[in-house]
């Protein structure tokens, strides 16, 4: 199976989406000159070129792309060639209205933007397959081709009649009979019983709350329907070029796609990530997306397919990245395992809906401040490539995340609409990030034995297999910390007897879970040592020890945090400092160590490939103690007296003095995965997560 390494060949790819069809061909020559200047090694072409490649049904215009591919090759720039199927040409909707998606009110989404296709439409699929076939046949042997990029950010949803038929086929495969579907969906409630398959429709607009199991299955189906589209195109390109890796770019931590399932179908896992430059925790968000994507890639290298060099154009107010932030976030991605740092897009458009979105080469041209920073990043990545490309990142703490749990948790009639699953996950990841731990993400059914500590911020829905996996992990000596509203429902969204799975309650030492007590909007509850937010629970401890109790409100005196041995339950969302202290304590007991002790606030440290990356996300200069003798490979200077001075947004990449380029201490390259066998020098738990997927 081809991998990212086949495209990188020991380098870190650097580049971005390139849309030369928006420009006269004279501009292409300037693009090549400036790409070379900036150290660009890879561009993604053809993402939105369908109307250019197929101006009318069945007609092909490849001439411009032939010239472009040749030009790229002549300048040593690799092509990540996209199938153009994310944006069908207007003729398709005009001739075949059935290819257009419909929303849950039955309204058509028309052409004039992009992504106006129904994943279930056989006509769309046939045209997509045909253009993909011809593209793959034409460029299979082209020397510029390094990777296939299928479609773009698969994200359409559709509620049309064709989708209804497809949904029924999906449900038939899942349940076999309508009776089984009635049972799984609990249709005895509100007279929802289906008497035949023809009555089952996508969950369209309805008078009141809809059946949550129906909604959950529709989310599962939609993810699967889009995945079928991906697979169909992947199989076509792979047939022509079995040696060329295939990817599709994920939206980051996005609800519409079960990215665990998708990642397993890709050769390369790639993501588009756009932290808000205004967000003081944008660096933590970038770290979270990196950890999640790396884990989807099985712990190995992954790809930033898109980020912004400056401002985006889709927030209410779009501020550019201040000087240094683009570089900081780019090097952070590399520190956390990325072997490709790419952007949307190379040259800023002058027309169209994204002309105010930044690019590597902005309207101001090659003398722009942003382009200077891009050039610097290109040069530094060229330097780091031979040191880190192909290496892995060690993580001994895992955060559990599952799309199905998210989908279940965010149903219409839930206890609190104040609780947003991604925010809860982000709060827990933040606590670990601030405590200096490098984290991985894992699915609750993955092998967790390689981690010293596993946290489940909120897994509302857990299958039996997942529950058994968590129990086995904790009983095998792992430290498990569960957040509120975990283990509530089974895989069909049926509430477990007692309101929480009995096996989990036994593990955590919970006697009775009397009630969930979500907090009023903005409300807090005092607890021993911290302030709780969002949620509280009326719990009775069984054989657990109470670590912290509620101190005010209706639950004053009742347990807030419980533990039974190494299994912890946190029944509220502690404030950031409180959660950091709690998880820090659990991690310390589990033997999980921060990368560096005593990091100043806003400073991140990560080890990769024998190098220590130290990143200042703060807006003020800091001094960081780095015990040992180190040399900064970017600044090409030694660290004096073990103290590293970092300006705002500054990054140091340190190599231990005396360590050769191949890393006397072991560089963690593929194959060098201590922990895979589950043994560590200290207590038998793995040091490096080899079990991320
Ligand atoms: C996404 C898309 C790109 C572009 C950017 C803008 O990531 O894939 O085509 O629209 O957003 O931020």
Image (cartoon, rainbow, N blue to C red):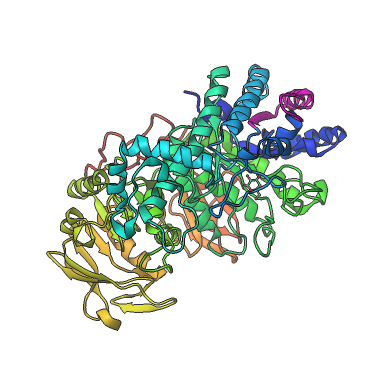
In front of the other: 586 or 665: 586
Tell me where residue 61 appears, x and y as whole percent: 77, 25
Image-based side of 406 in relation to 343, left or right: left
Q: Is residue 397 above or below residue 547?
A: above
Q: Residue at x 55, y 45 (%)?
A: 155
Tell me where residue 688 appears, x and y as whole percent: 35, 41
278 drawn magenta:
no
Q: Residue at x 80, y 39 (%)?
A: 22
Q: Residue at x 26, y 54 (%)?
A: 480
Quarter the C terminus occupies: top left
Image-based side of 572 in relation to 107, left or right: left
**Image quadrant where residue 663 sits:** top left
Say whether residue 643 is visible: no
Image-based side of 382 in relation to 245, left or right: right
80 drawn magenta:
yes
Name the residue furthest front. Answer: 195
In front of the other: 550 or 229: 229
Image-based side of 313 in relation to 491, left or right: right
Which region is colored magenta? 55-83
């Amino acid at each position: 199976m081809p991998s990212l390494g086949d495209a990188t060949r020991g380098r870190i790819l650097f580049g971005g989406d390139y849309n030369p069809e928006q420009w006269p061909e004279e501009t292409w020559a300037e693009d090549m000159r400036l790409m070379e200047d900036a150290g660009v090694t890879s561009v993604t072409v053809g993402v939105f070129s369908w109307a250019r490649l197929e101006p009318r049904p069945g007609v092909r215009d490849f001439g411009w792309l032939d010239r472009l591919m040749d030009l790229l090759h002549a300048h040593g720039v690799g092509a990540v060639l996209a199938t153009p199927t994310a944006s069908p040409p207007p003729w398709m909707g005009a001739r075949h209205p059935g290819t257009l998606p419909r929303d849950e009110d039955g309204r058509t989404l028309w052409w004039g933007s992009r992504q106006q296709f129904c994943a279930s439409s056989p006509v769309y699929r046939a045209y997509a397959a045909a253009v993909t076939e011809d593209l793959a046949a034409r460029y299979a042997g082209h020397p510029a081709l390094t990777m296939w990029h299928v479609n773009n950010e698969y994200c359409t949803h559709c509620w049309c009649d064709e989708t209804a038929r497809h949904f029924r086929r999906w449900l038939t495969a899942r349940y076999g009979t309508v009776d089984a579907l009635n049972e799984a969906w609990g249709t005895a409630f509100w007279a929802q019983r289906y008497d035949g398959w023809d009555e089952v429709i996508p969950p369209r607009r309805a008078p009141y709350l809809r059946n949550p199991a129906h909604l959950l299955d529709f989310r599962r189906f939609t993810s699967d329907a889009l995945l079928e589209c991906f697979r169909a195109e992947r199989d076509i390109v792979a047939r022509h070029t079995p040696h060329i890796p295939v990817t599709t770019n994920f939206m980051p931590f996005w609800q519409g796609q079960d990215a665990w399932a998708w990642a397993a179908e890709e050769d390369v896992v790639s993501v588009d990530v756009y932290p808000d430059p205004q967000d003081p925790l944008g660096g933590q968000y970038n770290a979270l997306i990196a950890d999640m994507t790396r884990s989807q890639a099985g712990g190995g290298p992954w790809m930033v397919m898109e980020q912004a060099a400056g401002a985006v154009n889709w927030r209410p107010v779009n501020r550019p990245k201040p000087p240094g932030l683009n570089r900081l976030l780019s090097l952070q991605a590399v520190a956390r395992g990325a072997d490709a740092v790419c952007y949307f897009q190379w040259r800023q458009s002058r027309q169209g809906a994204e002309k105010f979105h930044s690019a590597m080469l902005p309207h101001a041209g090659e003398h722009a401040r942003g382009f200077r920073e891009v050039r610097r990043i290109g040069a530094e990545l060229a330097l780091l490539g031979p040191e880190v490309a192909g290496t892995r990142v060690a993580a001994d703490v895992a955060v559990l995340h599952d799309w199905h749990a998210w989908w279940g948790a965010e149903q219409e009639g839930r206890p609190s609409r104040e609780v947003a699953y991604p925010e809860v996950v982000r709060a827990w990841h933040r606590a670990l990030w601030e405590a200096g731990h490098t984290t991985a993400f894992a699915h609750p059914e993955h092998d967790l034995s390689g981690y010293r500590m596993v946290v489940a911020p909120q897994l509302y829905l857990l299958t039996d297999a997942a529950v058994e996996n968590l129990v086995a992990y904790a009983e095998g000596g792992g430290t498990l910390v569960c957040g509120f509203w975990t283990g509530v429902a089974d895989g069909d969204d049926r509430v477990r007897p007692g309101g929480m799975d009995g096996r989990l309650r036994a593990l955590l030492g919970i006697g009775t879970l009397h009630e969930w007590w979500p907090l009023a909007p903005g409300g807090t509850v005092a607890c021993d040592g911290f302030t709780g937010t969002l949620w509280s629970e009326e719990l009775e401890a069984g054989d657990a020890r109470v670590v912290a109790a509620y101190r005010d409100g209706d639950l004053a005196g009742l347990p807030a945090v419980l533990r039974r041995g190494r299994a912890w339950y946190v029944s509220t969302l502690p404030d950031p400092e409180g959660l950091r202290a709690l998880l820090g304590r659990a991690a310390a007991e589990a033997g999980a160590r921060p990368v560096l002790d005593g990091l100043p606030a806003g400073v991140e440290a990560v080890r990769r490939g024998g190098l220590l990356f130290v990143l200042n996300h703060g807006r003020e200069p800091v001094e960081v103690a780095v015990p040992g003798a180190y040399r900064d490979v970017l600044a090409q200077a030694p660290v004096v007296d073990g103290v590293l001075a970092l300006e705002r947004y500054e990054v140091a990449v340190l190599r231990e003095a005396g360590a050769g380029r191949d890393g006397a201490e072991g560089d963690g390259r593929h194959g060098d995965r201590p922990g895979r066998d589950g043994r560590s020098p200290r207590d038998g738990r793995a040091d490096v997560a080899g079990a991320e997927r």
